[in-house]
Amino acid sequence: MKKPTLATIWLDGCSGCHMSFLDMDERLLEIAERADIVYSPLIDAKEYPTAVDICLVEGAVSSEDDLERIMLVRERTRTLVSFGDCAVTANVPAMRNPIGVQPLLDRAYVENVTLHPGIPLEVVPALLPMARPVHRVVEVDVFLPGCPPSADLIYQALVDLLEGRTPDTSAARFGR
Ligand code: SF4
């Protein structure tokens, strides 16, 4: 029987949620037995597949690159999980929202720089006016808060999803 497909992506986040994913340790083997991991920063896949069953999305939508990726991922994914506080509330990335894009870039790339100050116009994706939680941009099916969500919580949520249940995330807590 064909296994369900599982993906993870990383938008504007610190990678801590993916580190917590890795903290599932030996349970990763069980997840890999039960699902085909088809796309993730943790594997060497370059293109997001056309039909994915479950995708964990870490991070807020902060740049034009994030926006393009989340639109494509939503279109190609059956169950989209907002994975961690940055995805669920915009959390740390949203700290820049009251500052405004231009003053932020000036501070980071010009005022605080002694060698070659200048705002990058290539390679670094352009920032959107605000960092936004994923559900403010596309529809989200499951919310998994935590900064990061614990490995136990991630494991239980994945098992529930792989067995066709809506995960019980009542043990999840914002900020830890
Ligand atoms: S929720 Fe916390 S651990 Fe996850 S990406 Fe954001 S800051 Fe990092």
Image: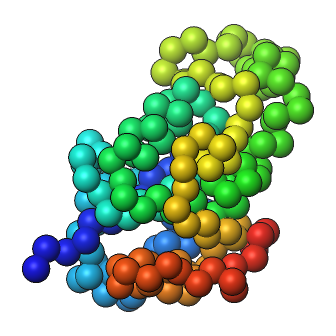
Q: Where is residue 153 in the image (x, y as percent from the top left)?
A: 58, 82
Relative to 76, does residue 174 appear above or below in the rendering?
Answer: below
- Image quadrant for the N terminus? bottom left
* 4 left or right of 40 in image: left
Q: Nearer the viewer, residue 51 or 114?
A: 51
Q: Which of the two residues, 21 or 143, is positioned nearer the viewer here?
A: 143
Q: Position of residue 43 (x, y in %)?
A: 30, 58
x then y, percent, for residue 104: 81, 24
Quadrant of image for the C terminus? bottom right
Q: Which residue is drawn at 65% across and 25% down?
A: 127
Residue 46 in view in this figure: no
What residue lies at 61% left-to-right and 66% top-to-bottom? Answer: 143
Residue 67 in sight here:
yes
Number of numbered markers: 0
User: Depth check: 141 or 67 in front?
Assistant: 141
Relative to residue 96, is residue 93 drawn left or right? left
Q: In which quarter of the image is residue 173?
A: bottom right
Q: Which of 71 and 36 is in front in this view?
A: 71
- Residue 156, position as x, y percentages in the image: 50, 86
- When the figure is inspected, residue 24 is found, relative to residue 47, above or below; the finding is below
Q: Residue furthest left?
A: 1
The residue at 32%/63% (across/down) is 53
Residue drawn at the location 46% of the way across and 31% of the way down: 68
